[in-house]
Amino acid sequence: MARNNQYPIILGMNPKNKQGIGIKSKLGSGYDVYILQDDLSVQYAWIHFCNVEAIDDMIRLLQRTKEIWEKEEKENNE
């Protein structure tokens, strides 16, 4: 049987049981984003951004994903 941290990270589910934390990286430069269990007992993801451009790229990816999702929902509601 797979452990909880081997399943996809599901944000926005009820009850909400995950939190995101962004902090200065201990790797020397950049920032880290962690997705954790709400009680900090499990780490689901760690994303290291070595520069601001990498964060901008992630934001663009998420915005594009949202646009595709909204377009699909609109088409399904017509």
Image (cartoon, helix red, strand yellow):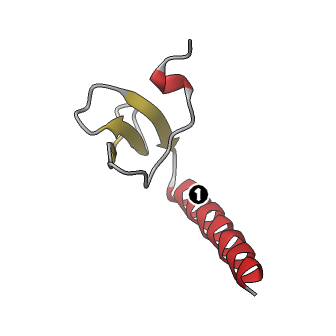
Expressed as whole percent of the image width and height from the top left, the position of residue 46 reads 46, 35
Report the residue at 37% width, 51% height from top.
14
Expressed as whole percent of the image width and height from the top left, the position of residue 3 reads 49, 17
Report the residue at 43% width, 45% height from top.
30
76 vs 53: above or below: below
Q: Residue furthest top?
A: 1
The amino acid marked with disc number 1 is: Met
Q: Name the quadrant containing residue 23.
A: top left
Expressed as whole percent of the image width and height from the top left, the position of residue 10 reads 49, 45
Q: Name the quadrant containing residue 26.
A: top left
Q: Name the quadrant containing residue 43.
A: top left
Quarter of the rendering occupied by the N terminus = top right
Q: Which residue lies furthest to the front in this view?
A: 77
Report the residue at 68% width, 75% height from top.
73
67 relative to 12 in the view: left or right: right
User: Which residue is more in the foreground, 58 or 63?
Assistant: 63
Report the residue at 51% width, 45% height from top.
50
32 vs 43: above or below: below
70 vs 24: above or below: below
Question: On the image, numbered disc 1 is attached to which residue?
Answer: 58
Quarter of the rendering occupied by the C terminus = bottom right
User: Which residue is more in the foreground, 54 or 1?
Assistant: 1
Q: Residues within 10 Å of mark 1 (few under 14, many from 20)?
A: few
Expressed as whole percent of the image width and height from the top left, the position of residue 48 reads 49, 40
User: Which residue is more in the foreground, 45 or 32?
Assistant: 45
13 relative to 55 in the view: left or right: left
Disc 1 is placed on an element classified as: helix
Q: Which residue lies furthest to the bottom in this view?
A: 78
